[in-house]
Amino acid sequence: MLRIEIKNEFPFILSLSVILVVLIGMDGSGTGRVVLGLPFVLFFPGYTLIAALFPARGDLDGIERLALSFGLSIAVVPLLGVILNCVPWGIGLYPILVTLLVFTILLSAIAICRRKKLSLENRFGLSLNVKPIKWGSLSRLDKILAAVLAAVIILAIGSLYYTAAIPAAGEKFTEFYLLGSDGKAEGYPRVMKTGETKEVILGTVNHEGRQVSYTVQVRMDGEVKRQLGPFQADNEEKKEESVSFRINEPHENLKVEFLLFKDGESVPYRSLHLWVNVQE
C-alpha cells in the first residue's frame, strides 16, 4: 500500500490562486480561467476557513472537511460580494478577485499559525492511502463498475466545464458591462471634484438571437441625467461607447447608475452602478 501525505497544502492552494490572478491579468484563455477559477471560488475559501477553525487532525474527518469546504465557500463568496457592493470599490472582476485572494491568504496564515501550536501528531494533514489493484484480479462485475465510475467522472467533469465555459444552447441574453476609460475592468472614477468630467465605457453584446433596440440611461440619485439611444444591435453584435458625466455639487457616496432598456420597455433589463465621492 502506498501512503501519500501532504503536511502543508497551503503553498499549493496559494500557488494556484496566484496563477489564476496572473492568467486573468494577462487576459488568459477561458479554459484556464474555468479550470483554476472553479476551485478558487467554490472550494479554497471554505477550505481555508475550515482549516483555520479546525486545525487538529481529530476535529473533523475528511468527508466532513470536504463537504464543509464546498458549503462554506458557497456561503462566503456571496457574503463578500454583498460587502463589496457597500464600499466604493463595488462589484467587479478585480475587486472580487483581490478580495477572495486576500481572504484565502489571511485564512491560510491563520490556519498555519494554529497548526504550529499543535504537536506533529495532532496537526491535520492530507493523507491518501493508495492500494495497487491488479485489473486481472477484479471480477467481471467490479470491472464493469470501475468502467462506469470512470465514465461518470469524465462525463461530470466535461459537463461542468462545458456549462461554465459555453453558454447553454438557445440561451438568450444581453451582456452589459462597464469599463474604465482605458478599456479595462479597472480605473473606475471613485473620487471627483465638482464640475470635473469623468469618462467610462459602456458595452453591450447581443445574444438575443435577433436584432434588438437598446436605450441606456445615466441616473444620479434616481434622476435621469443622460440618455443614449435608442440604438440597434444585430445578433452577436458588440457595441462599446464612451460615456462622460459631470457632477456640479459635492456628494458623499453618490450612486451613479447605468440602466439598460430593451425594445422600449419601461423596466430596466440590466443595471450597473458606481459609488462616487464628489469633493469641492
Image (tube, rainbow, N blue to C red):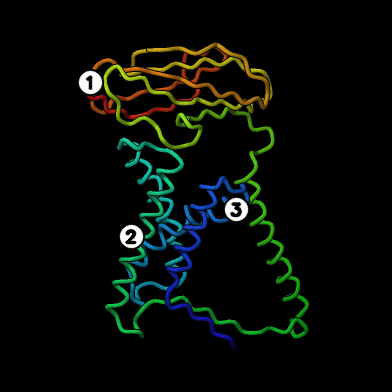
Q: Amino acid at mark 3?
A: Gly
Query: In the drawing, does residue 140 fall left or right of residue 208?
Result: right
Q: Which mark is residue 250?
A: 1
Q: Which residue is mark 2?
A: 106
Neighbor class of circle 3 (other Cα within 10 Å; few <14, some 14-19, many 20+) is few
Q: Position of residue 269 (x, y in %)?
A: 50, 22
Mark earlier in primary sequence (3, 1): 3
Q: Nearer the viewer, residue 195 or 95?
A: 195
Mark earlier in primary sequence (2, 1): 2
Q: Nearer the viewer, residue 180 or 226?
A: 180
Q: Are marks 3 and 2 in contact (CB under 8 Å)?
A: no
Q: Mark 3 falls on what kind of element?
A: helix
- Report the mark closest to the observer, 2 or 1: 1
Give the answer, above or below, for where 129 lies relative to 216.
below
Mark earlier in primary sequence (3, 2): 3
Q: Mark 1 falls on what kind of element?
A: loop
How far apart marks 3 and 1 lie (CA) works out to 44 Å
Q: Which residue is mark 3?
A: 32
Neighbor class of circle 1 (other Cα within 10 Å; few <14, some 14-19, many 20+) is some
Q: Nearer the viewer, residue 243 or 64?
A: 243
Neighbor class of circle 2 (other Cα within 10 Å; few <14, some 14-19, many 20+) is some
How far apart marks 3 and 2 lie (CA) works out to 25 Å
Residue at 64% over, 57% down: 157
Query: In the drawing, does residue 183 fall left or right of residue 220?
Result: right
Residue at 55% over, 17% down: 262
Q: Mark 2 falls on what kind of element?
A: helix
Q: Amino acid at mark 1?
A: Pro
Q: Amino acid at mark 2?
A: Leu
Q: Position of residue 55 (x, y in %)?
A: 33, 72
- Report the mark closest to the observer, 3 or 1: 1
Q: Position of residue 188 (x, y in %)?
A: 40, 32
How far apart marks 2 and 1 lie (CA) works out to 37 Å
